[in-house]
Image (cartoon, rainbow, N blue to C red):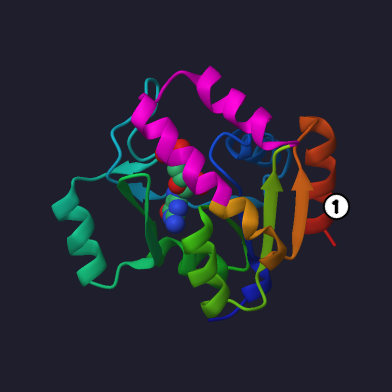
Amino acid sequence: MTNQKGLILITGPSGVGKGTLVKKLLAENKNIWLSVSATTRLPREGEKDGKDYFFLNKNQFKNLIDSNGFLEWAQFAGNFYGTPKDEVQSKLSLGKKVLLEIELEGARQVRKNFPTGFQIFIAPPSFQELERRIRERGTDSEDAIERRLLRAKEELDAQKEFDAVIINDDINRALVEIKSLINK
Ligand code: 5GP
């Protein structure tokens, strides 16, 4: 696949503020295209199908796996998530910068297929602060929160695999760091 350097990936534990960082980054960089993932998770309040995610049922998701429609996919906290392949490939072949905001297992799969892509890990100032942010969001059940926290520990252990680690203690500073990394 051509233009591998155009593939930027952001990972980090649930609640670390990746979504806000990505929104700000896109608002300031019109040349970056954000891939819309598919998921079997139910929409949160305000989320729109086709914009935040493609919300699929398990059968639809499995059909896409079987037809080789994903660049990567993974299970996360009881749901499936995946990056639809076609759109990413066509944007890369047009020379666009493509951004993926996905979890660790998916990042590892992408790393195998796009070794020259650039992978950024967003870390919280501390685990306690991450837990506070996930609970404050108030959108998940206690069970889902527990699963997200468990997974967050695994993700934090893997940060050394990434090309860069950015601590999100101050969103504007973190954004400046991301911009300088991807514009290098
Ligand atoms: P949430 O349910 O909070 O929207 O997302 C849960 C986790 O799934 C987040 O860490 C998010 O980055 C990740 N995620 C979102 N889309 C994808 C995807 O297409 N593939 C993978 N592997 N993870 C994803």
Count of numbered circles on the image: 1
The residue that appears at 41% across and 40% down in the rendered structure is 147
Relative to 174, is 79 on the left or the right? left
Question: Callout 1: helix, strand or loop?
Answer: helix
Magenta span dominant secondary structure: helix
Relative vertical location of residue 162 with respect to residue 53 in this rendering, above or below:
below
Q: 143 and 82: which one is in front?
A: 143
Q: Position of residue 30 (x, y in %)?
A: 67, 45
Dot 1 corresponds to which residue? 180
Relative vertical location of residue 138 with respect to residue 37 in this rendering, above or below:
above
Q: Residues within 10 Å of mark 1 (few under 14, many from 20)?
A: few
Q: Position of residue 59 (x, y in %)?
A: 14, 54
The residue that appears at 47% across and 62% down in the rendered structure is 106
Relative vertical location of residue 88 with respect to residue 13 in this rendering, above or below:
below
Q: Is residue 52 visible?
A: no
Relative to 101, is 24 on the left or the right? right
Residue 156 shown in magenta: no
The residue that appears at 65% across and 70% down in the rendered structure is 117
The residue that appears at 57% across and 44% down in the rendered structure is 13
Residue 142 shown in magenta: yes
Question: The C terminus is located in which quarter?
Answer: bottom right
Q: Is residue 49 visible?
A: yes
Q: 113 and 162: which one is in front?
A: 162
Q: Position of residue 75 (x, y in %)?
A: 35, 55
The quarter of the picture where residue 47 lies is: top left
Q: Amino acid at mark 1?
A: Ser
Magenta-drawn segment: 125-153
Q: Residue furthest left?
A: 59
Q: 156 and 88: which one is in front?
A: 156
The quarter of the picture where residue 164 lies is: bottom right
Q: Position of residue 44 (x, y in %)?
A: 36, 26
